[in-house]
Image: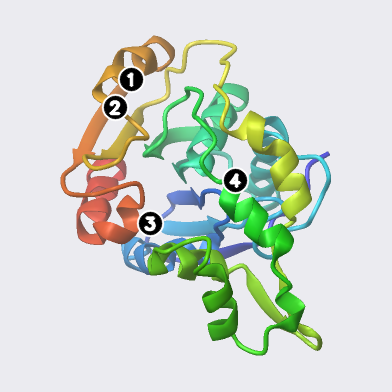
């Protein structure tokens, strides 16, 4: 059953167009705040917390179909018939399923650094950290960061993961629903099966330093997307919108505007 997602609106009173943005695994709508603020000079922007992430409801049911239904409900609640959509990583796979189920609600879509293929598991350490670290015992985010450093050396990734912490009266707790997300993980990294060929205009954006989309994936993608373009962002890894914000903004404007 669809749930009412938490979202943030960046309005533009001069535009009738809307673009929805969806984060990746362990992310939230805030991850796109800087880019959404700039993009709102051209379009109405809605950033979304997907189910079991951020401030959106927790539910034991988690699948791409269910997540797509959440987006459809959100559009209905906002009285938006058709929109642009951007999805990064897990969010990119979600909008692949969304456009398959609700093609009439998608004017154009941008899929950021993810393909509809199966991936090898690469987040096991993070699940283990979320399950084993006693966040209630930490008196500060610095303490949590030090504990997480034994599992993840990259400070940028640690800071991204620690955005999932929220302060409460007993220390810290997690915003995300770790058990539900972990139960979904094997399906999350699995391939997307389409009911039909996607004809909606689609742009796949990928980083030259990322392994998520390779040149060899392009023929596979073209089998499912008949009206598709590709854009490689040089000197960027998986987090294109954070690593190359100026280039990412231009790519989005050029495709949507």
- Residue under numbered circle 2: 214
Q: Position of residue 238 (x, y in %)?
A: 35, 46
Residue 8 percent across, percent down from the top left: 57, 65
SS label for mark 4: helix
For the residues labelled 4 and 1, the Cα–Cα distance comes to 25 Å
Residue topped by disc 4: 124
At mark 1, the secondary structure is helix
The local secondary structure at tag 3 comes to: loop
Q: CA distance from mark 2 to mark 4?
A: 23 Å
| Side of 156 where 21 appears, left or right | right
Residue wearing tag 3: 43
Q: Nearer the viewer, mark 2 or mark 4?
A: 4
Expressed as whole percent of the image width and height from the top left, the position of residue 255 reads 27, 40
Of mark 2 and mark 4, the one earlier in the sequence is 4
Q: Which mark is residue 217?
A: 1
Closer mark to the observer between disc 4 and disc 1: 4
| Residue 72 tag number | none
Of badges 2 and 3, the one in the foreground is: 2
* Residue 212 percent across, percent down from the top left: 37, 35
């Amino acid at each position: 059953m669809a749930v009412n997602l938490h979202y943030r609106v960046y309005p533009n009173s001069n535009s009738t167009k809307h673009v929805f943005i969806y984060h990746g695994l362990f992310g939230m709508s805030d991850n796109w705040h800087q880019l959404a603020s700039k993009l709102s000079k051209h379009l109405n922007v809605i950033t979304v917390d997907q189910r079991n992430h951020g401030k959106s409801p927790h539910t034991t049911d988690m699948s791409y179909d269910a997540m797509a239904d959440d987006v459809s409900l959100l559009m209905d609640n906002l009285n938006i018939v058709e929109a642009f959509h951007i999805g990064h990583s897990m969010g990119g796979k979600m909008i692949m399923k969304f456009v398959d189920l609700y093609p009439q609600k998608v004017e154009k879509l941008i899929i950021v650094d993810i393909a509809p293929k199966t991936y090898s598991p690469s987040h096991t350490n993070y699940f283990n950290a979320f399950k084993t670290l006693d966040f209630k015992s930490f008196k500060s985010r610095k303490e949590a960061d030090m504990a997480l450093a034994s599992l993840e050396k990259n400070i940028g990734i640690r800071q991204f993961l620690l955005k999932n912490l929220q302060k409460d009266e007993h220390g810290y707790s997690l915003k995300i629903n770790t058990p539900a997300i972990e139960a979904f993980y094997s399906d999350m990294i699995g391939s997307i099966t389409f009911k039909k060929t996607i004809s909606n205009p689609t742009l796949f954006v990928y980083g030259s330093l990322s392994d998520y989309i390779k040149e060899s994936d392009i023929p596979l993608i073209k089998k499912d997307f008949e009206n598709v373009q590709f854009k490689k962002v040089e000197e960027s890894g998986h987090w294109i919108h954070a690593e190359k914000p100026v280039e990412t903004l231009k790519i989005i404007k050029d495709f949507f505007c």
